[in-house]
Image (cartoon, rainbow, N blue to C red):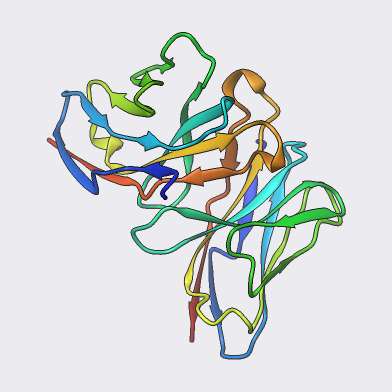
Amino acid sequence: DGGITQSPKYLFRKEGQNVTLSCEQNLNHDAMYWYRQDPGQGLRLIYYSQIVNDFQKGDIAEGYSVSREKKESFPLTVTSAQKNPTAFYLCASRSRDRGSGQPQHFGDGTRLSIL
Amino acid sequence: AQKITQTQPGMFVQEKEAVTLDCTYDTSDPSYGLFWYKQPSSGEMIFLIYQGSYDQQNATEGRYSLNFQKARKSANLVISASQLGDSAMYFCAMREGWAAGNKLTFGGGTRVLVKP
């Protein structure tokens, strides 16, 4: 089945540590996105990439980094500079179907907590 | 100013009844799209329905329909014949234009609890 796979499902970070969240898609979508969701709130955009080897900052990029070396993969690194990383992280890719507005489709998310 | 506003933090609805979830938006771009997503307690975001700013008719998708009032800048989601499985968070989101990465801006969400 085609879809978006995020791993791990749960992740714990120690103080001063960088951690990387994985996002893989086999939908052949060009554009991919990373969002952060805090409890009881909506999603906020961290980074997005429209094509391989290119990415742009979203609204809350500070303390995060990404890479896009392959079309299928868009990993997110939460660096030690991100002082409040505890949140639910969602990865998405964008459909090419203009008839339905090119919706973004999401993975199951990664819950990151501080130890 | 908030671009997407969902004023109902939580709602109860009786099973088999209809429920309307409010969403108002703010944009000066004449070309935009509005999306509704469902987020069950497990966390994944499920795309439900889409309305384009130039669409003449309200969007429908099974038990979901969108009450689009362009002049009032509202795009309310109507869920008919509610089922227990409809209990979830619901988010309204907007895409402004077709360029700049087709980024989505999300509202704060409405929690729906369906009572048997």
Camera-side residue: A38 or A109?
Answer: A38
Residue drawn at the location 72% of the way across and 62% of the way down: A75
Q: Is residue B62 left or right of residue A54?
A: left
Image coordinates for residue A12, horizontal then vertical, percent: 53, 79
Residue drawn at the location 79% of the way across and 62% of the way down: A67
Q: Is residue A42 left or right of residue A97?
A: left
Camera-side residue: B67 or B116?
Answer: B67
Q: Is residue B68 above or below residue A70?
A: above
Residue furthest top as drawn: B56
Q: Is residue B81 left or right of residue A94?
A: left
Camera-side residue: B110 or A111?
Answer: B110
Residue drawn at the location 18% of the way across and 42% of the way down: B11
Image coordinates for residue B42, horizontal then vertical, percent: 40, 52
Image coordinates for residue A8, horizontal then vertical, percent: 59, 65
Camera-side residue: A28 or A102?
Answer: A102
Q: Quadrant of residue B57?
A: top left
Residue drawn at the location 38% of the way across and 21% of the way down: B71
Image coordinates for residue A81, horizontal then vertical, percent: 63, 82
Residue furthest front as drawn: B28
Q: Which quadrant of the figure contains the N terminus of chain A?
A: top right
Residue furthest bottom as drawn: A15
Q: Is residue B105 left or right of residue A24?
A: left
Q: In this figure, what is the number of numbered marks?
A: 0
Q: Is residue B13 above or below residue A35?
A: above
